[in-house]
Image (cartoon, rainbow, N blue to C red):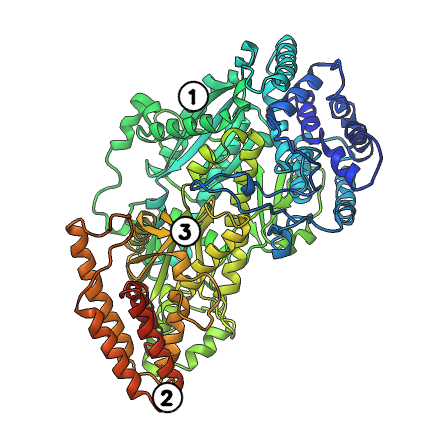
Amino acid sequence: MEEEFVLAVLAGLLHDVGKFAQRAGWMKGTHPEVGGEFARQFVPEDWRKGLYPVMGHHERPLQGRETKAVALADRLSAGERLPAEEEQPRQLLSIFCALTADDRQSPGKMYWPLRPLRMEEEAIFPGESPAEKVQEAYSALWEEFEPEVRRLREAHASGEHLSVYVESLFLLLQRYVWCIPSAYYRTLPDVSLYDHSRTTAGLVACLLDQEEAVLDRLLDALWKWNEARQKVASAPAPEALNTEVALLVGGDLSGVQDFIYTITARGATSALRGRSFYLQLLTEAAARFVLRRLGLPITNLLYQGGGNFFLLARPSDKDRLKEVQKELSRILLAHHEGDLYLALSSIPLTAADFYDGRISGRWEELGRELQKAKQSRFAELGSDLAGLFAPRGHGGDEERECQVCGREHPGTRKDDDTRKCPPCLSYEDLGDGLRRARCLWMSEVAPQIPADPPKVTPGGWQEVLRALGMEAGVVEKLSEVPDDGRPRWILALKDEAMRDLAPDGHTVVGRRLLVNVTPVYGKADEEWLKGLPQAQRGLLRQELPREPMGKIKPFALLEAQSTGIQRLGILRMDVDDLGKLFAKGLGKQATLSRIAALSFAVSLFFEGWVEVLAERIGKTEDGRERLYSIYSGGDDLFFVGSWDAVVELARAVRADFSRFAAGHPGVHASAGIVLVGGKYPLYQAAREAGEAEGRAKSLRWWGDGSERRKDAVCFLGQAIPWHRFGLEKCQEGMETVHTLAHRLERLTRPKGGAPKALLQMLIRLQEEYREAAEEARRRGEERNLAGEEQVRYGPWTWRGYYFLKRMSRRLKEKPDARAFVDILAERLHQDWFRSIEWIGLAARWAELLGRD
């Protein structure tokens, strides 16, 4: 990329930085004036000459093509800012407060804390009212930011590697201005300075493709339209705004599920995390490959996660994208033999598409185009596609067959008495490295695109990334990062690792959010094993690798460390109707920067905060780790672990997601949890957890006077709304499945006072009730005329009440147990036994918790 082009993008990134400095009290003046002084003081001297647009983008008339591109990008990014009747707080309003979801609005206004981006509760959860000492908060932010930006300036004093400087500054702004509103005076402050600045910079890169006369025409049309809209809000957009100014490009990796889960139990625990993380690296490498091929900066990458990416390109890039798609397909076909495919699609964006909420519809249209592309995988390769169906391997060569993935490979060898191919061994190495990793490093190399038709002997994950032009690795110590003087990236995987990072002239430094929770065998596990019966201890030791200390725990050990029954828990969970939230949730308020803000917020939770929850919940008091993150990113997650820990994690994720989403009643997630044995095939367990999640998402239930859907969990084969399942910590009472299950488990212990027969009776009564309910559903009699669930009468009603009352009389010498059983009987009696649905589930849960 030419320096002049990159400097214009940098100007777009910094065009509103003066607002931060101004609010922090660093300097008085208009924000363009303060921004200009910021550039003079904090940008390396060799690059200041290209930053006139920072202080000139609000002048009339605008001077120069680059300044006009920044001015236009600024307006397109913001779209139509939402007016407010009075001056708003100088604090960022949660983007979730702007959403309409499930036909519901946010209950009130909640504001992000004015703090640097760190995975701390007080830093990333919104509060009900703005901070009382806003000025002090801005000043504290600036006091942390200023030395960092000075250090970055000194690191690049030589004036080399401008793109490295831009990306380091980009990550620095992410850390410090993610919580600062881009505008607040008489404007709803729901877009951060970070999201507005990055989308502005991305649009600058696209608009520089236009002739200056086109930029003049677009700016003039926007000014006239704004004047017209002040008189008539519905004034039509001028014809000039139908000019195409950008392409919205999407990439979608398919084949992910089979790639991760269709492996045998041999080496699965170490390979799983490596496979999953490799797919994240592959998505990033593919996104950067597209940017590099198109000559676009990192600011044009709007979102990356969950096997997807979205970016902005120029209208003139459309034909080049077709060639890029072919190159990507040849690489993936050669290295993955058709197992993985990256669909790449684009739609044009006109200037008018950035107004009146049209951008949401365009995003939805791109989603449909990606689905079409995924239905014709590799079709772009034409005649070269024949290689996909050619015979592979020698057929029946057992010595070459990998016992993990089942593929034949000439490099297959024995490892721990198991035959493994080079790719599987590389995923195991990557997973093993992740368990102690503190940093991710990357560097650019020349891409290695296979010839037509692609013929490559598949190697490890490193070879695939290298083909895409990237080298990468994870390290515990910075001294392990290779340094040959080429541009590179070093990204901290933990907040505390940021302290060790320092920029230099060829190194991008920053924070990478990654849920990296891997259960490692330690001293606490060794002590735990000593307390087991000899026979069980011997069986578990057979499952451990040689010299197990510090290595990833096998599933069999996670299963054995469960509370109660020994089972492995499988959790799959994602946000309900996220696509609809993006397409419809913002309505006419949708702008590019608001959509960017929403995607950033969702990924912040699932790629950042989920790790904090899993580390907190997954560790026992004696230090044993019981949760394994297979994947968490985008808007979904997949965890394996001791079954009781998995259930508690699901509850915590759902509860905290509601808090994180400003308590919006229409923003929620559903989950599926299944319990399996440690040797159960993972692909089947993953499929069953997915089916359970599907049952949760299909649930219809009555709440707040209307029929509700989703926002549920499926556990032990039964879907139930989260509010009934229980999102709070275990307390006395019986209005949630969680609290009742734990109360029943305590009461039916040997010293609890109540017999275990209580659990069996409740389970049996639920089964009878559910059989009757199923019969009513078959007859179409499950709901009354009001649409509510029909009351069902049957022998279980009086028989259950009689059994409970008789048990109560037998417990006259156990007053606590007796009182509880009486309450239980009356609770069932009051609602004609409807509550047996969740009370029976609680009894089943308690029975599992109490198993020896």
Query: Would you name the residue on which mark 2 appears?
Result: 814
Q: Residue furthest right?
A: 28
Residue 809 location, quadrant: bottom left
Q: In the rendered image of this protein, does residue 676 appear above or below residue 497? A: below
Where is residue 127? Give x, y as percent.
Answer: 62, 51
| Quadrant occupied by the N terminus | top right
Looking at this view, is 542 or 420 the one in front?
542
User: Disc 2 to disc 3, how far (Cα)?
Assistant: 39 Å
Where is residue 154? Give x, y as percent.
Answer: 79, 39
Residue 69 location, quadrant: top right
| Quadrant occupied by the C terminus | bottom left
**In the drawing, does residue 382 fall left or right of residue 35?**
left
Q: Secondary structure at mark 2?
A: loop
User: Disc 3 to disc 1, how far (Cα)?
Assistant: 50 Å
Tell me if residue 486 can be seen: no
User: Label 3 is placed on what type of residue?
Assistant: Asp
Is there a contact, CB below 8 Å, between mark 2 and mark 1?
no
User: Label 2 is placed on what type of residue?
Assistant: Lys
Query: Mark 1 packing: few (<14 Cα in 10 Å), some, or many (20+)?
Result: some
Picture disc at residue 704: 3
User: Label 1 is placed on what type of residue?
Assistant: Lys
| Sequence-first tag of 2 and 3 | 3
Query: Would you name the residue on which mark 1 appears?
Result: 322
